[in-house]
Image (spheres, rainbow, N blue to C red):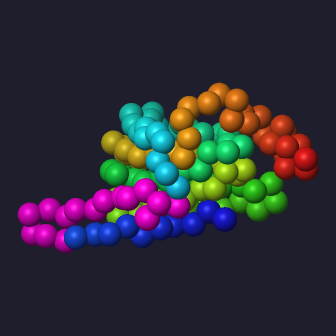
């Protein structure tokens, strides 16, 4: 199931430090890293599921919501701190919305980009779950 993972946070008067280690803080080997930024107000990102890819999403700056759907139940996670992130296993629908001004989403992925790993239609996703 998707869940929040707390990351190490070292507080210092000069500025805080947080880090992420693969197969330690995230339960997979990191194959790809990308970030989402400059999202116009009212827009959403995502709107798909992955067959194999796992993700770990961190709000490095600002805030946003991640809706995760297993075909039966939807959960909304509000990400607004850079010292925790959301782990999303494969096989779940996800959408990101409510981006604050200047928000920055960091996404760690367990796979390289593969268009064939995406399920981009919600009805197809529900059918895939029944297979």
Relative depth, front residue between 57 and 42:
57
Q: Looking at the picture, how far across and down is residue 62, in whole percent?
A: 36, 51
Q: Looking at the picture, how far across and down is residue 53, in whole percent?
A: 62, 45
Query: In percent of the image, x 53 and y 55: which residue is there?
Result: 28
| Main SS class of the magenta portion in the image | loop
Query: In this view of the protein, can residue 15 be seen by the observer?
Result: yes
Tell whether 26 sits left or right of 70: left
Tell whether 20 sits left or right of 55: left
Does 107 appear above or below 40? Answer: below
Relative depth, front residue between 67 and 53:
53
Query: In percent of the image, x 47 and y 67: which residue is there?
Result: 5
Residue lying at the far top of the rendered structure: 115
Does 125 appear above or below 5? Answer: above
Q: Looking at the picture, how far across and down is residue 70, in whole percent?
A: 75, 56
Residue lying at the far left of the rendered structure: 14
Q: Looking at the picture, how far across and down is residue 104, in whole percent?
A: 37, 44
Residue 116 lies in quadrant: top right
Query: In percent of the image, x 22 and y 62: which residue is there?
Result: 17
Residue 22 painted magenta: yes
Question: From the image, which quarter does the N terminus lie in?
Answer: bottom right
Tell me where the magenta segment starts and ends, as one range: 11-27
Does 60 appear above or below 111? Answer: below
Residue 33 painted magenta: no
Query: In this view of the protein, can residue 98 be seen by the observer?
Result: no
Tell whether 111 sits left or right of 69: left
């Amino acid at each position: 199931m998707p869940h929040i993972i707390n990351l190490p946070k070292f507080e210092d008067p000069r500025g805080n430090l947080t880090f992420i280690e693969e197969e330690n803080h995230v339960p997979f080997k990191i194959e790809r890293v990308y970030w989402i930024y400059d999202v116009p107000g009212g827009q959403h990102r995502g709107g798909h599921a992955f067959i194999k890819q796992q993700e770990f999403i961190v709000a490095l700056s600002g805030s946003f919501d991640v809706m995760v759907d297993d075909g039966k139940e939807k959960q909304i996670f509000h990400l607004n701190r850079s010292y925790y992130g959301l782990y999303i296993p494969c096989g779940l629908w996800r959408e990101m919305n409510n981006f604050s001004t200047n928000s920055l989403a960091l996404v760690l992925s367990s796979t390289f980009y593969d268009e064939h790993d995406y399920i981009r239609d919600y009805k197809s996703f529900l059918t895939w779950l029944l297979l």
